[in-house]
């Protein structure tokens, strides 16, 4: 690994706070919620933490949180969000810290790296003996992508779009089967899998829908006429998370909880 890879990772502009911000804020909330349902202990290593949107949420719930990212630009934003969290600027492959953690998260990272097997082994090396590694990746079999294939806007579910390649910097796509195979190839054990957020529209469409949808009671939008007042946008996202638990293969994100 060399400086060229770090420069490559720094060159991609995507961040949760700047692209499709409404949807990504809700998705981040439920990604963290899912992690909190599966973590162990009270220390967590966040690989890679990006601009710190999820690191900040973790830090409210877990006493010891450490963030790592290859992008100095992203880390500056993360440090402003959570000045009490320790951050390291490094590629995961080159990270050298002695501390061991009860939980390690890799949320939307494997699709970016050169060698995912190497990165899985490296991440697991930071675990305490009874710790858990939680890996999230975008799901190529998500229902919105299956619809896109039928519509003809994607040639296959695992096709990488220009946004994936040029903005987000993805190198590969995942479904539950190939995610679990890579974990096994790394010599690690999958203890559970699941999905996060039932998603029928593309990310850009979801973001528009959350910002502009008919969320008020009545008016043939969400909610029943004369029903109890609720935040229907929030309820829609909560329901999408709960439905996704029962249908992981349809979800935006799939995950694996992993032990040594």
Image (cartoon, grey):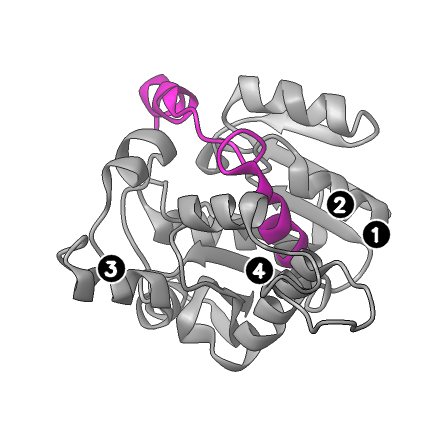
Asked if the residue at tag 2 contacts the one at tag 3, i.e. Cβ–Cβ closer than 8 Å, the answer is: no
In 3D space, how far apart are the residues under numbered discs 4 and 2 (Cα atoms)?
16 Å
Q: Is residue 130 visible?
A: no
Q: Is residue 76 magenta?
A: no
Instruction: Tell me the mark number nearer the camera, choosing from 4 and 2.
Output: 2
Dividing the image into 4 quarters, which one contains the N terminus? top left
In 3D space, how far apart are the residues under numbered discs 3 and 2 (Cα atoms)?
33 Å
The residue shown at (64%, 18%) is 76
Asked if the residue at tag 3 contacts the one at tag 1, i.e. Cβ–Cβ closer than 8 Å, the answer is: no
Q: Secondary structure at mark 2?
A: helix
Q: Quadrant of residue 186?
A: bottom left
Residue 207 in the image, given as x and y percentages of width and height: 50, 45
Which is nearer the eye, 249 or 177?
A: 249
Instruction: Tell whether 42 sits left or right of 50.
Output: right
Asked if the residue at tag 1 contacts the one at tag 2, i.e. Cβ–Cβ closer than 8 Å, the answer is: yes
Q: Earlier in the sequence, mark 4 or mark 1?
A: 1
Per the rendering, the mark at residue 134 is 4
Q: Is residue 14 magenta?
A: yes
Q: Which residue is mark 3?
A: 148
Q: Secondary structure at mark 4?
A: strand
Pick out the residue farthest to the bottom.
246
Q: Which residues are magenta?
A: 1-30
Instruction: Tell me the mark number nearer the camera, choosing from 3 and 4.
Output: 3
Q: Secondary structure at mark 1?
A: helix
Which is nearer the eye, 186 or 222?
A: 222
Q: Is residue 234 visible?
A: yes
Residue 204 in the image, given as x and y percentages of width and height: 41, 44
In 3D space, how far apart are the residues under numbered discs 2 and 1 (Cα atoms)?
7 Å
Q: Which residue is mark 2?
A: 57
Q: Main secondary structure of the magenta part?
A: helix
Per the rendering, the mark at residue 61 is 1
């Amino acid at each position: 690994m060399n400086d060229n890879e770090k420069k490559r990772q720094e060159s991609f502009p995507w961040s949760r706070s700047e692209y499709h911000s409404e949807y990504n804020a809700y998705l981040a909330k439920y990604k963290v919620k899912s992690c909190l349902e599966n973590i162990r202990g009270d220390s967590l290593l966040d690989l890679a933490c990006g601009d710190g949107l999820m690191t900040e949420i973790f830090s409210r719930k877990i006493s010891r949180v450490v963030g790592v990212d290859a992008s100095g630009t992203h880390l500056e934003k993360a440090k402003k969000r959570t000045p009490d969290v320790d951050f390291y600027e490094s590629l995961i492959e080159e990270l050298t810290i002695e501390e061991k953690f009860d939980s390690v998260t890799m949320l939307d990272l494997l699709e970016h790296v050169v060698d995912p097997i190497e990165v899985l082994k490296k991440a697991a090396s930071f675990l305490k003996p009874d710790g858990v590694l939680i890996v999230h990746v975008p799901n190529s079999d998500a229902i919105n992508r299956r619809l896109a294939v039928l519509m003809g806007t994607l040639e296959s579910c695992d096709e990488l779009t220009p946004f994936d390649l040029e903005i987000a910097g993805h190198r590969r796509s995942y479904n539950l089967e190939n995610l679990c195979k890579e974990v096994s190839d790394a010599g690690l054990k999958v203890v559970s899998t699941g999905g996060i957020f039932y998603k029928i529209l593309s990310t850009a469409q979801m973001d528009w829908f959350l910002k502009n949808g008919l969320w008020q009671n009545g008016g043939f939008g969400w909610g029943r006429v004369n029903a109890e007042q609720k935040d229907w946008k929030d309820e829609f996202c909560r329901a999408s998370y709960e439905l996704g638990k029962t249908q992981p293969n349809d979800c935006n994100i799939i995950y694996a909880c992993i032990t040594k």
